[in-house]
């Protein structure tokens, strides 16, 4: 594994993207945050296709933050592909979404999401949950 | 924090059990902690058999903290049974172990563990890890209300 520490953020909402980046940075979580704005871009990045076909194959994200309602390919479909493929199957995937739909929750866990967080509309609450999420998954959780 | 979110701790080492409960209490995590001391007791609790045969098995824990090296049935086998039973298949399982073996890590995730925490040897660090773990899984993480799809 290369030295670069990366988080893949799959998020189509620019406000949420900014908030998440700020919350991570403020809490000294100094990872490169790669942003994919739809499902196709997320898979292109992970599996080195399309605009990412030249990217360094040794760099894989330590954490994937995945929105469900994203354009082109849905978050749940992206999750399925992550879990089906060897290079990505053990990367922690945290679903970060505004809709706490019961069906989404169940399918996310069934497809192998590690955790499911609701984006709060309250800025402070959302900021705090991103902070705690970063501390837990990057500071304490172990991966192969 | 909701009081009726149960933490299910599967741990055979009494020192670690005490430390874990102490660390949760010290951090105002006052949720009920149910402890099973071996794999058989763990499955009895989850599936309502043995001494737990009269328990309402629809009351499921918010998070399961699972040690790997357990008497009678080991932790990975317990995890396998959790993931193959409709009642428990979607419950968050955090492996909490002193094992440093890469194989345990790989097998744990392959069998569907949500997270894997190596128990820090240092007391302060252990307490801190339990605090973060408690906050994360009891306050932040969302679970489905039912297991039926």
Image: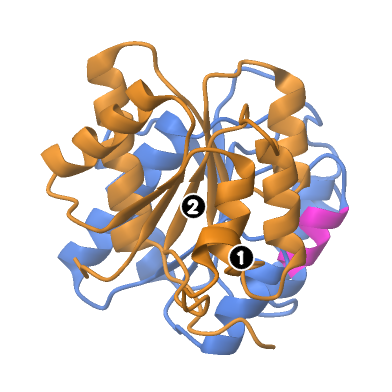
Q: From the viewer's perspective, is residue A80 above or below residue A71? A: above
- Residue A135 appears at what percent x and percent y? 35, 38
| N-term mark: 1 or 2 | 1
Is residue B13 located in the magenta-colored stretch of the structure?
no
- Residue B37 appears at what percent x and percent y? 49, 38
Residue B49, label in figure: 1
Q: Which residues are magenta?
A: A78-84
Subunit of label 2: B
Residue at the image position 16 percent from the left and 43 percent from the top: B25
Q: Colour of chain A?
A: blue
The secondary structure that most of the magenta stretch takes on is helix
Instruction: Check if mark 1 and mark 2 are on a common chain.
Output: yes
The chain coloured orange in the image: B
Judged left or right of residue B99, residue B120 is left
- Residue A142 appears at what percent x and percent y? 56, 30
Residue B64, label in figure: 2
Q: Is residue A32 or residue A138 the one in the foreground?
A: A138
Rounded to the nearest whole Å, what is the CA distance between mark 1 and mark 2? 18 Å
Residue at the image position 78 percent from the left and 44 percent from the top: B110
- Residue B79 appears at what percent x and percent y? 68, 49
Kindly tell me whether residue A138 is visible in this rendering: yes
Indicate how the structure is coloured in the image.
Answer: by chain
Q: From the viewer's perspective, is residue A82 above or below residue B84? A: above
The quadrant in which residue A50 appears is bottom right
The kind of secondary structure element at disc 2 is strand
């Amino acid at each position: 594994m290369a030295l670069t520490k990366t988080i893949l953020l799959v998020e189509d909402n620019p406000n949420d993207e900014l908030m998440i980046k700020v919350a991570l940075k403020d809490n000294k979580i100094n990872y490169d945050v790669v942003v994919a704005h739809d499902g196709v871009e997320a898979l292109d990045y992970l599996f080195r296709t399309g605009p990412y076909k030249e990217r360094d194959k040794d760099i894989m994200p330590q954490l994937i933050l995945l929105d469900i309602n994203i354009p082109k390919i849905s978050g749940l479909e992206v999750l399925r592909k992550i879990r089906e493929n060897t290079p990505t199957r053990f990367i922690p995937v945290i679903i970060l979404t505004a809709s706490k739909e019961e069906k989404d929750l169940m399918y996310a866990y069934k497809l192998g999401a590690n955790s499911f967080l609701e984006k709060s509309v309250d800025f402070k609450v959302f900021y705090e949950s991103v902070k705690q999420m970063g501390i837990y998954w990057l500071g304490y959780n172990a991966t192969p | 924090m909701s009081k009726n979110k149960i933490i299910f701790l599967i741990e055979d080492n009494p020192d670690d059990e005490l430390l874990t409960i102490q660390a949760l209490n010290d951090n105002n995590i006052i949720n009920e902690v149910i402890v099973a001391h071996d794999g058989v007791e763990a499955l009895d609790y989850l599936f309502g058999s043995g001494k737990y045969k009269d328990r309402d098995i629809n009351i499921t824990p918010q998070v399961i903290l699972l040690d790997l090296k357990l008497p009678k049935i080991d932790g990975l086998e317990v995890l396998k049974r959790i993931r193959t039973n409709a009642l428990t298949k979607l419950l968050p399982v955090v492996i909490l172990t002193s094992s440093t073996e890469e194989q345990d890590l790989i097998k744990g995730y392959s069998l569907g563990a949500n997270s894997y925490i190596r128990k820090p040897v240092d007391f302060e660090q252990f307490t801190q890890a339990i605090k973060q773990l408690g906050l994360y899984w009891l306050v932040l993480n969302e679970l489905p209300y039912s297991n039926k799809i």
